[in-house]
Image: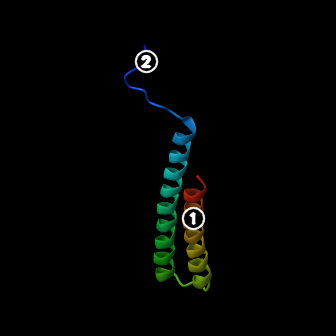
Amino acid sequence: MESVLNINFDIWTLIKILALLVLGIYIIFAFIITRQVKIMTSTLTLGFEFIARFLAFIHLAFAIFVFITALVVL
């Protein structure tokens, strides 16, 4: 007798959803790093503020790029 609740469970779909969730959390982390660098460079004058802000922005942009790429590929 066939089950009334025929649920197709695919482990790969679960892994894809979890990977996208982790990448989404990483984007939040990258945004927090960008804000922290902005606050740090506004309070401290060390001479490399532009480089620190630039690297933080590149990090955030790369995190967003990886998320979008994973969204398309997965």
Q: Cβ–Cβ below 8 Å for labels 2 and 1?
A: no
Give how far across and how far down residue 26 sits, in percent. Answer: 52, 58
Residue at image location 46% in from the left, 72% down from the top: 35
Give how far across and how far down residue 38 sits, in percent. Answer: 48, 77
Give how far across and how far down residue 30 sits, in percent. Answer: 52, 65
Between discs 2 and 1, the one toward the N terminus: 2
**Residue furthest to the left:** 4
Closer to us: 43 or 50: 50
**Residue furthest to the top:** 1
Closer to us: 19 or 32: 19
Q: Nearer the viewer, mark 2 or mark 1?
A: 2
The residue pinned by badge 2 equals 2
**Is 10 rendered above or below residue 67?**
above
Residue at image location 55% in from the left, 60% down from the top: 67
Q: CA distance from mark 2 to mark 1?
A: 45 Å
Q: How many marks?
A: 2
Q: Amino acid at mark 1?
A: Ala
Q: Which quarter of the figure is the N terminus placed in?
A: top left
User: Counting other residues with Cα less than 10 Å from the Cα at mark 2, is it few (<14), some (14-19), or many (20 or more)?
Assistant: few
**Is 11 rendered above or below residue 51?**
above
Q: Is residue 74 left or right of residue 9?
A: right
Secondary structure of the residue carrying numbered label 2: loop
User: Counting other residues with Cα less than 10 Å from the Cα at mark 1, is it few (<14), some (14-19), or many (20 or more)?
Assistant: many
Residue at image location 58% in from the left, 57% down from the top: 70
Q: Quadrant of residue 61?
A: bottom right
Residue at image location 48% in from the left, 67% down from the top: 31
Q: Amino acid at mark 2?
A: Glu
**Residue furthest to the front:** 1
Closer to us: 25 or 54: 25
The residue pinned by badge 1 equals 63
Secondary structure of the residue carrying numbered label 1: helix
